[in-house]
Image (tube, rainbow, N blue to C red):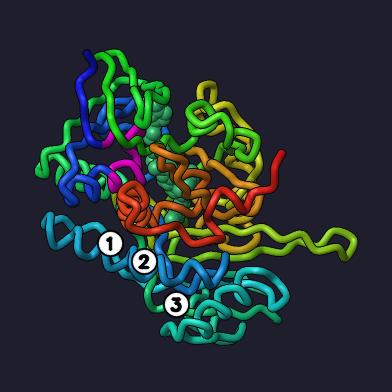
């Protein structure tokens, strides 16, 4: 006879760890199952830092969820005594006709967010490390900074245990429907529950095959370099995003890059957004290749030449992408799920975990632009 729980959460990364916490806070008996060891960094959440920012270029409709996520991270810090979020401010630079600065300005103006608008002279005066074009503009976002992802996940797990959640690690799980509920099976046995939360990141296509045609998994590499000089200036940087533009025979090609303040223990961290290598999460190459480093160094040489020093660290990570770049959060009978965080979902994990708990208990619905039903049939 399988052991019974009110809810089972499969996948204890960013969103699953937050979901177990919020389900347990609402009084449910919860089991959380994770395929790898506690503290692993083999999914989408490894790499020491994740940007959080409110003037969101991706869409102004994310801003209410972001405000709530920020408050919940601060609440988690108070409840746990951990320091998880460093507010550094954010600097987003690029061409006027690009996506980044106009999108961030739209969110800031629509939602009355504290921000400052800069022209190229201002950017050069304040941040001479960046080589920018004469017609670029920027926005300085006050409510921005970075989260420590491994500590955020561990803190949600630790507080979940305090609320009685049973956690199992090193156990890849499968599931099936069973009457009105579900049965989940892993190496340690079978478990029955009324509710299932699926938050398996890059493995969601395996666990929810109906989503698979909409998802693709992308390999991305984060790098840390030791600057050649100006280390103090690198350490004073806010979190930043640059929309770079390269012209081939006058046709512009845009690509975003982002980074963090220098940290003496690891170096100056930066990466490119969406390089586009499609991978199978069970066969991903976890070593940084020379081509990965050359791509990022060619950007550094052009736009931040003082950072072109020794490589200190590299980390391979995976995005789970949806067709429109927006998350997929929904419920189908006993199954609630969050997926396709398309390279920008960590900052929301505190709020998405809560939303998963509310959806499970029928207390809320996901914002329309994030629901699965928006996806066209394939
Ligand atoms: C390089 C990189 C940089 C990023 N930068 C940012 C950023 O600056 N800001 C930001 O907000 N977001 C960023 N993101 C996106 C963000 O990190 C992800 O959206 C977020 O981490 C996804 O969380 P998740 O819970 O869906 O996945 P994960 O944290 O990977 O969790 C999924 C978990 O499910 C487990 N699992 C899978 N299958 C099973 C199974 N069958 N049984 C049991 N367990 C299973 C996995 O092992 C894993 O632990 C970045 C992502 C990458 C890769």
Label 3 to label 2, Cα distance in Å?
9 Å
Report which residue position mark 2 lands on.
145
Which numbered tag is attached to residue 327?
A: none
| Contact flag, marks 3 and 2 (Cβ < 8 Å) | no
Q: If the picture is divided into quarters, which one holds ligand 1?
A: top left
Identify the mark at residue 141; answer none if there is no mark: 3
Q: Are marks 1 and 2 in contact (CB under 8 Å)?
A: yes
Q: Position of residue 242 (x, y in %)?
A: 58, 65
Along the line of sight, the residue nearer the viewer: 311 or 318: 318
Q: Secondary structure at mark 3?
A: strand
Q: Is residue 16 magenta?
A: yes
Q: Residue at x 32, y 32 (%)?
A: 40
Residues drawn in magenta: 7-19
101 sits to left or right of 192: right
Cα–Cα span, label 3 and label 1 = 16 Å
N-term mark: 1 or 2 = 1
Upstream in sequence: badge 3 or badge 1: 1
Q: Locate residue 203 relative to residue 98 in the image: left or right.
A: left
Quarter of the image containing the N terminus?
Answer: top left
Mark 1 vs ligand 1: CB below 8 Å = no
């Amino acid at each position: 006879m399988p052991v019974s729980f009110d809810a089972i959460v499969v996948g204890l990364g960013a969103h699953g760890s937050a979901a177990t916490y919020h389900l347990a806070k609402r009084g449910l008996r919860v089991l959380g199952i994770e395929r790898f060891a506690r503290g692993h960094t083999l999914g989408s959440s490894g790499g020491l830092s994740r940007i959080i920012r409110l003037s969101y270029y991706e869409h102004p409709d994310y801003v209410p969820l972001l405000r709530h996520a920020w408050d919940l991270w601060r609440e988690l810090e108070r409840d746990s005594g951990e320091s998880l979020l460093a507010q550094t401010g954010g600097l987003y630079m690029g061409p006027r006709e690009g996506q980044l600065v106009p999108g961030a300005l739209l969110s800031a103006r629509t939602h009355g967010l504290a921000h400052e608008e800069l022209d190229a002279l201002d950017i050069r005066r304040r941040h001479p490390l960046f080589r920018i074009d004469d017609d670029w503009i920027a926005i300085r976002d006050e409510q921005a900074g970075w989260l420590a992802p491994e500590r955020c996940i561990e803190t949600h797990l630790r507080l979940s245990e305090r609320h009685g959640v049973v956690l199992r690690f090193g156990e890849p799980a499968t599931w099936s429907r069973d009457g009105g509920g579900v049965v989940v099976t892993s190496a340690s046995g079978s478990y029955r529950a009324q509710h299932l939360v699926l938050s398996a990141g890059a493995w969601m296509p395996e666990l929810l095959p109906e989503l698979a045609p909409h998802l693709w998994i992308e390999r991305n590499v984060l790098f840390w370099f030791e600057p050649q000089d100006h280390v103090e200036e690198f350490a004073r940087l806010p979190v930043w995003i640059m929309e770079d533009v390269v012209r081939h025979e006058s046709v512009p090609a845009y690509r975003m890059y982002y980074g963090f303040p220098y940290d003496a223990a690891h170096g100056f961290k930066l990466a490119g957004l969406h390089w586009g290598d499609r991978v199978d999460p069970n066969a991903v190459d976890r070593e940084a290749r020379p081509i990965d480093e050359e791509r990022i160094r060619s950007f550094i040489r052009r736009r931040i030449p003082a950072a072109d020093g020794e490589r200190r660290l590299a980390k391979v990570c995976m995005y789970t992408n949806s067709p429109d770049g927006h998350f997929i959060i929904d419920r189908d009978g006993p199954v609630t799920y969050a997926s396709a965080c398309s390279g920008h979902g960590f900052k929301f994990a505190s709020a998405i975990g809560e939303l998963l708990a509310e959806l499970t208990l029928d207390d809320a619905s996901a914002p329309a632009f994030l629901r699965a039903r928006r996806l066209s049939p394939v």
